Image: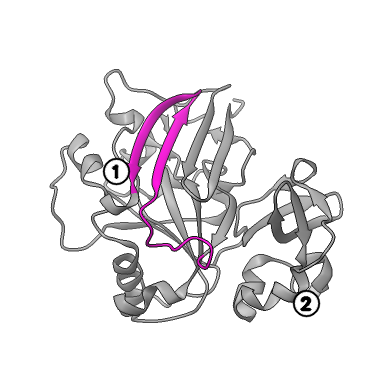
Amino acid sequence: MKWMSFATPMGSSFGVVQGDHIIDIGMRLGPTCPDLRTALRAGPLERFSALVAGATPDHHVNDVMFLPVIPNPGKILCAGLNYVAHRVEGQHKTEAAVPPFFTRFAQSQVGHAQPMVCPRESTQFDYEAELAVVIGRAGRRIAEADALSHIAGISCYNDGSVRDWQLASGQWTPGKNFPATGAFGPWMVTSDERAPDSVLSLVCRLNGVEMQRTTTDLMMFNIPQLIAFCSTFTTLEPGDVIVTGTPGGVGLRRDPQVWMKHGDVVEIELEGVGILRNPIVKEAA
């Protein structure tokens, strides 16, 4: 199944995408289950199969506002430097014992088709194509062999980077957490439809020009390794998100450098999931 979060004039909800239409699960369940994170915490999404079967769609995808797949995650944990090509272009060591991680906050992300905002404090707004993993089952110290069973599904992520703030200190957090600088969507494809450990192509296009391309088997630390690592230092809970790193080709490392600017359109395409597309706007002074 494809699950998405969205908003209508009636409020925010979540549901199952079928073609160009949405079956509104949140509306059917009522206030006891207002969002996808709550649904995941209550149990496997497979339990909604009977509710979806034969249901009449409630919305067309063009008539709703896309929200981040999980609008209110407890944690967004982001792996850095997880592709060799990205390490090479930045002149980093091509070997590492553990993956570096940083955190994002929920307000730093937007949904599909919503503007990503270059803050007025920056002139260096960069794209980063990534695969995002949504946790479906809680766990601490999860073994690599068990990691895939803790995944609800996967999605596209644009880990937009405000480079001048990211590189101003030894910490990446400031450059990753300006409001509306990242994007998450358009939906989550569940693990039964697309295995998270499949070899998938991942592409970024800026104004239709391909900027990044890789396959997910080229991660230095694969998804089970990332889950095992993260669940050692924190309990992973349903609705948490792990963003798995970007390949080579980022704007920072190009000659000349390429920055996203007002009026641009950036796309992240993940094979078997779809295309996350966002316009870029410059925050007014």
Left or right for 261, reference 102: right
| Magenta segment | 191-215
Residue occupying image coordinates x 31% and y 49%? 171
Q: Is residue 259 above or below residue 168?
A: above
The picture places residue 197, in percent across and down from the top left corner, at 37, 62
Q: Is residue 203 above or below residue 227?
A: above
> Which quadrant is home to the N terminus?
bottom right
Which residue matches tag 1? 169
Give amino acid for label 1. Ser
- State whether residue 128 appears in this view: no
Q: Position of residue 120 (x, y in %)?
A: 53, 29
Comparing 10 with 175, the one in front is 10
For the residue labelled by badge 2, is the local secondary structure a helix, a strand or a loop? helix
**Which residue, given by chain and number where applicable, does mark 2 sit on?**
32
Crowding at mark 1 (Cα within 10 Å: few <14, some 14-19, many 20+): few
One can see residue 12 in this view? yes
